[in-house]
Image (cartoon, rainbow, N blue to C red):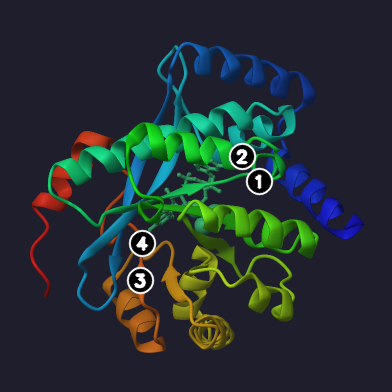
Amino acid sequence: RAKAINRGASQYFHAEMGIDARERFKLLKGLRASFEERRLFVVYQPQVELATQQVIGAEALLRWRTSDGQFVPPDQFIPLAEQSGLIVPIGEFVLRTACFQIAQLRRNGFSDFRIAVNISLAQFRHPGFIDSIRRALRDAEIPGGALELEITESMAMEEISTVLRVLAEIRSTGATVAIDDFGTGFSSLSQLRRLDVERLKIDRAFVHEAQSSAAGATIAQLVVNLGCSLGMRVVAEGIETEEQRQHLLALGCHEGQGWLFARPMPADQLEEWIRNRPPSR
Ligand code: C2E
Ligand code: MG
Ligand code: MG
Ligand code: MG
């Protein structure tokens, strides 16, 4: 427990290095104002089946454009939102936006489309979290199975009884769960097995290293084998080249996401992108 907290703190420190306290305060003030003024929005990055390149869903990613037109990257503002608690209402906004987007896609004929939403630890622990999922699903009139929630590896390794309870509650809504950025944390394999989640997302760093070093390739293979033997779908993040796609496919990885297929895009372009997608190759 103490270990997990320390790990979170050091990650936070790392992400914030180079930004001093005053700058952080200014940024947080700006974030709060932008959220109220509806200047935060959601983009979507398609996820495909590696073998056929057929689209299976998309990941929702938050974007912040400041009043003077600058983009602040999530890696800078998400930690601030997490530390201040603002991530709870912001996260609910992303969840609801994604659910309404799924509803629109389903109305327009993409009936089994799924969208994955990133969840922060503060949301995961929040007593109103499950209700907010149920409300979002009900208001958008979509089945739970159309929604996936991404929790990071370090969140999945929090105190087992809490994690198991929240995962069971999530499952009761019909939503599925993916473990994000896998390989960057310190997983207990026995805990991972007990979680029984649907997807494992290999962190981008390993996707790149799988190409550039023998050790990287070994780790990527181990992660794919681990996911497969636990009955999970394995997704590779950050695929940028055709060589990477083929390599991950050869390792037994099922799905992929990355610039090779598509960059994150606004909602209106997503539907067009899916429509123009060539059929299975
Ligand atoms: P993540 O969940 O691991 O998301 C994947 C990141 O990889 C995204 O960065 C995406 O734009 C980027 N990416 C995808 N394909 C490629 C590629 O081929 N090459 C490279 N270099 N990058 C690629 P992004 O959008 O900057 O988001 C960064 C992180 O911020 C996310 O990592 C996630 O941890 C967090 N985040 C984003 N949106 C949300 C949100 O709504 N809620 C929460 N809690 N966190 C979010
Ligand atoms: Mg993610
Ligand atoms: Mg990730
Ligand atoms: Mg990441």
The tag on residue 255 is: 3
Question: Spatial distance from mark 1 to mark 3, Cα to Cα?
Answer: 25 Å
Numbered disc in front, either 4 or 1: 1
Question: Spatial distance from mark 4 to mark 2, Cα to Cα?
Answer: 27 Å
Residue density around tag 3, few if under 14, some if 14–19, many if 20 or more, within 10 Å: many
The tag on residue 257 is: 4
Indicate the amino acid at tag 3.
Glu
Comes first in the chain, label 3 or label 2:
2
Question: Spatial distance from mark 3 to mark 2, Cα to Cα?
Answer: 28 Å
Whole-percent x, y for residue 248 in the image = 38, 80
Q: Is residue 129 left or right of residue 104?
A: right
Number of on-image labels: 4
Numbered disc in front, either 2 or 1: 2
Question: Spatial distance from mark 4 to mark 1, Cα to Cα?
Answer: 24 Å
Q: Looking at the image, can residue 265 be seen?
A: no
Q: Residue at x 32, y 75 (%)?
A: 245
Q: Are marks 2 and 1 in contact (CB under 8 Å)?
A: yes
Which residue is at the front of the view, 132 or 149?
132
The answer to whether residue 195 is above or below residue 222 is above
Numbered disc in front, either 3 or 2: 2
Residue bearing the label numbered 1: 124
Question: Spatial distance from mark 2 to mark 1, Cα to Cα?
Answer: 6 Å
Indicate the amino acid at tag 2.
Phe
Residue bearing the label numbered 2: 129
Residue density around tag 1, few if under 14, some if 14–19, many if 20 or more, within 10 Å: some
Residue 80, image quadrant: top right
Q: Are marks 4 and 1 in contact (CB under 8 Å)?
A: no
Q: Is mark 4 within 8 Å of ligand 1?
A: yes
